[in-house]
Amino acid sequence: MHRRREAWWLIAPLAIFMVVWLGFPFLSNLYYSLSDVTFETLSSPTLTGFGNFADAAGSAAFWQSLWFSLRFAVIATTAQIIIALTLAIALRPLLERYRFLLAVLILPLMISPALMGIMYKLMLNEFVGVVPQYLALFGLYPNLLGPDWVVTVVIAIEVLQWTPFALLLLLTALQAIPEELLDAAYVDGAKPRDQVRRIVLPLMGPAIAITAFIRFIDSFRVFDHIYVLTGGGPGTLTTSSSIFIYRAFFQQGRLGFAIASSLILMAFSLLLLWATMRYVLKGART
């Protein structure tokens, strides 16, 4: 009982911080999501019940943006995990011998996503961009920011920038695997492919799940480089949920609707967090 009381005292500061800095904004957003509110009536909103949630649930544009964000996040996260895991396994001996190479590989993380969007906007421009100019040398003239290629391009940019982050996490998890296990498997005649399939991947399962969750959430809420690069277009092809909420809040002045939409997305994220943590804890127990 005494140790339990000490534990409560230790977590009390963090609990108070969470309640003050996260609880109050959440309650404020919940109140506004149940109200008819604009910038002009921000200090005196009118409670209307769950009308904003009903409008969000019945909005085809909301579901279209949600579908784009979900598809974008799944494809980008899958590509990042596969590439990062492959690089971590293949380059582990080299990175352990020349540690400075890891610093070179994570350089893309130092670039702001918004700056990345500006950079690629110049590089991919069909008239003055360097990439279309090189493609033209091979007789290729695609409009990389047009309807046919823009979704592929924004996903590729996300993968190029954030794969180093996944590599850093997965390489750390890989280095935590005892060398004795791999040596014993080698002595027993296990080939490198079998070592990866039967030892490395099972032991790295929780780390892979956590890394995938972090990258999925970050990709799901993507805003910066897409907004700078395409503005959510052409049309609404690259309008993510974050861009949709931004437009509803700042451009249309539908504050209650935008906040209700964001709370729906938060509920989706919490559900995904619960599923991921359940998998990780189950793997830790086994």
Image (cartoon, grey):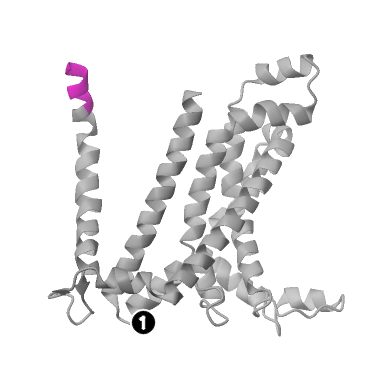
Question: Mark 1 falls on what kind of element?
Answer: helix
Is 81 left, or right, of 268 in this rendering? Answer: right
Q: Nearer the viewer, residue 244 or 40?
A: 244
Q: Position of residue 260 (x, y in %)?
A: 30, 67
Above or below for 278 versus 145: above
Q: Amino acid at mark 1?
A: Gln
- Verify whether residue 4 appears in magenta: yes
Is 215 left, or right, of 258 in this rendering? Answer: right
Q: Nearer the viewer, residue 33 or 243?
A: 33
| Rendering quarter of residue 241 | bottom left
| Residue farthest toward the right in the current orientation of the protein | 138
- The local crowd at label 1, few if under 14, some if 14 to 19, many if 20 or more residues have their Cα within 10 Å, is few
Q: Is residue 1 visible?
A: yes
**Which quadrant is the N terminus positioned in?**
top left
| Residue farthest toward the bottom in the current orientation of the protein | 127
Q: Which residue is mark 1?
A: 251
- Verify whether residue 248 appears in magenta: no
Q: Nearer the viewer, residue 60 or 128?
A: 60
| Rendering quarter of residue 101 | top right
Q: Position of residue 18 (x, y in %)?
A: 24, 46
Above or below for 245 versus 81: below
Q: Is residue 223 visible?
A: no
| Residue at the image point whose x is 43% and y is 67% from the top | 242
Is 139 left, or right, of 145 in this rendering? Answer: right
> Start and end of the magenta stretch?
1-7
Q: Nearer the viewer, residue 121 or 43?
A: 43
Q: Position of residue 282 (x, y in %)?
A: 47, 30
Q: Main secondary structure of the magenta part?
A: helix
| Residue at the image point whose x is 18% and y is 75% from the top | 42
